Image (spheres, rainbow, N blue to C red):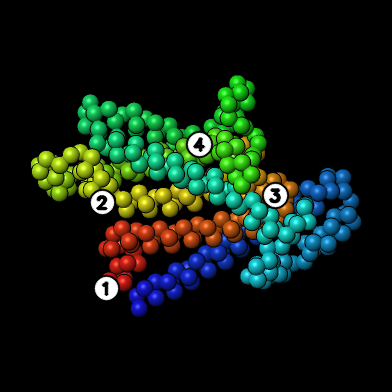
Amino acid sequence: MRLLMWWSGRALSSAATLLGVSVLIFAAVRLMPGGFAETVLGPFATAGQKADLAARYGLDQPVFMQYGHWLTAVTGGDFGVSMISRQPVGAELVARLPVTAELTVLAVAASVLLGVPLGVLTAVRARPGGGGAAGRLLSGLGVSVPEFVLGSLVVFVFSRYALGLEVGSWVPLTRDPAGNLTTMILPAAVLSVFSISVTARTTRDAVMGVLVEPYVTAAVGRGESPWFIVRHHILRNAATPVVTLLGATTAYLLGGALIVEHVFNLPGVGSYIVQAVGRRDYAVVQAGVLLAAGVFIVMNVLIDLLVGALDPRMGVMAGRRS
């Protein structure tokens, strides 16, 4: 019963969140300076030309009526038509989603494969003279450098000196997996720097909290090897905050993909939304933000379930056992 109540509550809160996001983004895109008519027709367009264009796309109707028509269509699976390309927005998002998904998966994988070992290492060597300062310094630098700054620097260096990796181009994964990886390594590396740093910091704090527990001291006293202690005692008990962070980090990476895809000229959802903002293509911006909010909500639910599986005292699993 508690599990059913939990699912019902999450469904209601998710629907309310999506509704709130839809209202905010619908209003925000129309409050941006320079409307669609001004952007498309230019500064010398006449009032009549602007009125005709607004009437063609229904922008002359009251805002609440526009929102009602759009929300009704979205609930039916219709995200509208791009004002620029005249193509269905839903189809465009589906076509571009694999690029963004691949970029995010590579960045998350880098966060786990590099951030977790770095955090464990800095925690184990946190004692004076242990050598953990270098790891803390690297994680601090990673948090401090914005993606657009690092991405622009990487694009300049690899374009200027031809270091062997493709910049500014993209190869489909289905056509040439090796070529695709060559074009995705740099964007994924830039996108993952922040998440690697945050993952390392969180892992370090979690591991240091576990190191002072009596069962770790007992394991050391029994003569168990350091690797066995880390794998069987420390990582298992420090995993909950790290897994929780990775869920939030994945949502953050989807947002960071907007900048990275634009900098590296990748045909993903992020660059599509950035171009739509510049062109005041309302339907694309609204659908893209709503999609990102939906992914964020799904990730939170999945993380809650995973945390409950790792630690039955927390999350929905606690309700099932009560």
Q: Residue furthest top?
A: 161
The kind of secondary structure element at disc 2 is: helix
Tell me how far mark 1 sits from mark 2, CA to CA: 22 Å
The kind of secondary structure element at disc 1 is: loop
Residue 186: x percent and y percent?
Answer: 54, 34
Give the mark nearer the N terminus: 2 vs 3.
Answer: 2
Q: Amino acid at mark 3?
A: Ala
For marks 1 and 3, give the one nearer the viewer: 1
Question: What quarter of the picture does the N terminus occupy?
Answer: bottom left
Q: Return the residue at label 1.
A: 322
Q: Is residue 95 visible?
A: yes
Q: Residue 189, labelled with which disc?
A: 4
Q: Amino acid at mark 1?
A: Ser
Mark 4 surroundings within 10 Å by alpha-carbon count, few (fewer than 14), some (14 through 19), many (20 or more):
some
Q: Amino acid at mark 4?
A: Ala
Q: Return the residue at label 3.
A: 276
Q: Amino acid at mark 2?
A: Asn
Tell me how far mark 2 sits from mark 3, CA to CA: 45 Å
In-front residue for pair 100/182: 182
Q: Return the residue at label 2.
A: 237
Are the residues at dot 4 and dot 3 in contact (C-beta closer than 8 Å)? Answer: no
